[in-house]
Each structure stands twice: as structure tokens, then as C-alpha cells.
Amino acid sequence: MPFDQTPMGFRAKTIGEIILDHDRQLVKTEQIRVSIDSNGLEPHKGMTNSILRRYTQNMAKLTVSSHFVRAALSGAERQGKDVAELLRCAGIPLQAYQNPRSRVGGPQYTKLMQCIWKVLQDEFMGLTDTVCKTGTFATMCYLVVHCNNLESVLRRGRIFYSLFEKPVTLKLEVHGDQAVLIVDAEATFHDPYHFFQESLLVIWHRLACWLTGQRVALDEARFNYPEPEHSSEYRHLFYCPLQFNQPDTRIYFHKRYLQLPVIQDEPSLKEFLKTSPADLLARPDDSNTYTSKIRALVGRDLSQQMPDFEFIASQINVSPQTLRRRLKEENTSFQEIKDNMRRDAAIYYLSRREMSINEIAFKVGFTEPSTFHRAFKKWTGVTPGDYRESVLRERQH
């Protein structure tokens, strides 16, 4: 049994028996190894290490809006916990927390989530009236990693979380060619930022992508609350059309994804959980988007002259007019992509010791350190020096 080292060892067997009874009613699709990879390749167990590396690399380069820092801390703050101490634990400067326009590095955000879990002993982070003990998510993952396909994963996970006294779980429905994953909550939310519902959808979507080794493309996301001020961040979370003020919160994707086989196993899951929730917050491979194609062409070394728009278009084999239109459909622009690349690269390099701040300024495309200092403070709310000191100080603890 995979539960020997979990605090739920005795109860997990009962849960497993309940779920296995349910699974016997599902249509077995183990023989149907359906692949929808754009290259026509079927995933296999040997791919798991490269998939894990890709997710970890994505998270290392990711930056997160300070809105999500405040939202993640709201439950702990409501319970009277020391927010400043939690920020220190994660290496996030207080100024970055307070500045609504600032951003923090993906690894720091991951550390913050882990600190909140540890302090509250609640994987729901104090955002509901249901306490989810630490280790619960890992136990659920050990159950679903043995599933045949994605449909079984989602149904098994739903049953697992429905065993809570006041469950916060998901519902899976299929309508025609569309599969629908719905937030189905009986618990009361203490979540003015709607962070918990966002996180539920994001984490289950990313887990589905990781378990199958495929990017599960979303067709639409709907939310049962008004459009928030930070809705521009949603395009990085869901990358699909969005609707607000809906009856419930849900995501749509094609039902063929439900038949994707699970390619992960317990050893790869063990590595995956070591950095949780980092790999669940990073976006799955989106190399087919024009934004990603541009970022790949430019690379991380921005010290050289940035290629002009016409050259980029020619390398992607589209006209400048078409590329401009495609970027607009992705809710971005060439200038925004360049600015975001400089910002994310700066945060990445400042989290390491290899280069001085002046060298980083040049590396990310600034000819004058003073200009870099002003830009970085605008991005994060703190100076490059303060940001580096905060991150490196945390690593010494």
C-alpha cells in the first residue's frame, strides 16, 4: 500500500476500498491508449523525468502577481497568524506584499504556500470551514496515480474529497463532446479574493496535464462571481475564453482527453510532490501559442539587441499582420512580451548568486543600472538589492 508513511494510513485503506468499488463500475479503457499529442507520439513511462524537469523549469521562470500573495495569506490573516513572519519564511519582502503592482518569483510563492500549510496544518489554507490536514493531497495523489486514464483520476479524486464532513470537491460531467469539471462545494468559503475556487480549477487542471504527460487544452472557464480586478492574470492561468457572474465555477475541455492514459508512477509522483505545489502552479507546456514561440526565439539572454517584430514574424512563418492579430487574440502584444521577459529574467537571476546586480541589468537588456533599478522597483515594489537580500537570507535558514 502507498500509505505506510502518511498520517491517514488506517483510514486510507477504507477510502481505497470505497473507490475501488466505484471503479469496478467504470468502463475499462486500459487497452485504448489514445494520444492527442500534436506530434502524434504516445506518452510512455520514460517521459516522466523530462516532463517533471519541464514543469520545474517553468516554475523557476514564473513570476506571480502580489495579488495572489495577499489572497493566499488571507485565511492565515483571518486566523490571527503573523503575516510578516510568513512572508519572511518565504523570502518575500513586505513591500512586495503591499504593492498591488509588484510580482514575486515562483519559488518564493511556492515556499509561501508551504509555510501556510505548515502553520495552519490545513491544505485549504483557512479559506473554508473545512480543515484539510497536511498530507491529504499527497494521499489522494497516490490513489489516482494507479488509475487507467484521466476520467478515472477525476472520478476517484472527486470521491476522495467527498468524504469530508463538509466537502469541497469537484463534479465531472460530459455533455456531447464536452467534458465539464465543476467546483461542487458544500463548505462555506472565507475567501473574498475567490482564491480557493481559482486554485481548485488550476491545480486539478495541472495535475491532469502532469499525470497524462499532455497539455489538456481548455475551451472555456466560467466563474460564479463578478469579474475581479486581477482578471488579466486569468489568461496566464487558464488560457481560454472566460465568463463571470455564472451559476457555478467550471472549466470545459474536449471529452477525448478523458481517455488519455496515466503515464506517471509512484517514483515520479514522489519527486513531483517534493516541490508541490510548484509544479501544479506552473502552466503546462504551451509551446503552440505565439507568445511561447516568441519567448523561445528571443531566449533568456536579453543583452543582445532584441529582434524586431518583422524578423520574429518571418521566423514563425506568418506575416506581421497575422502575428499582431494572433497576439491580440492571446490578449498580449510584442511590447508586453518583451517587458514581461525582462521582468521574469531579472527575478530569476536575482534569486541566484552568480551575477552582480549591474551584470543582471545588462543581461536583461538595460544599458544603465539606474534604469534597471527604477524598472525593477516598479515591477516588484522593492529595489533589486533588497529583493536579492530577502531571497538569499531565507535560503540560509
Image: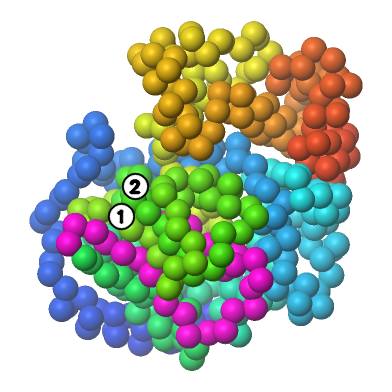
Residue ID at (81%, 24%): 372
> Looking at the picture, how far across and down is residue 64, in whole percent?
65, 47
Instruction: Judge the density around disc 2: few (<14), some (14-19), many (≥20) Cα neighbours within 10 Å.
Output: some
Residue 180 located within the stretch drawn in magenta: yes
> Looking at the picture, how far across and down is residue 142, in whole percent?
39, 67
State which tag comes first along the sequence, 2 or 1.
2
> Looking at the picture, how far across and down is residue 46, in whole percent?
31, 41
Please say if 378 is above or below 24.
above
The stretch of residues the image draws in magenta is 176-205
Image quadrant holding the N terminus, namely bottom left
Residue type at mark 1: give it: Phe
Mark 2 in CB contact with mark 1 (< 8 angstroms): yes
Task: Provide the residue designation for mark 2.
Answer: 217
Task: Provide the residue designation for mark 1.
Answer: 253
Judge by depth and name the residue closer to the eye, 296 or 8.
296
Residue ID at (21%, 65%): 175
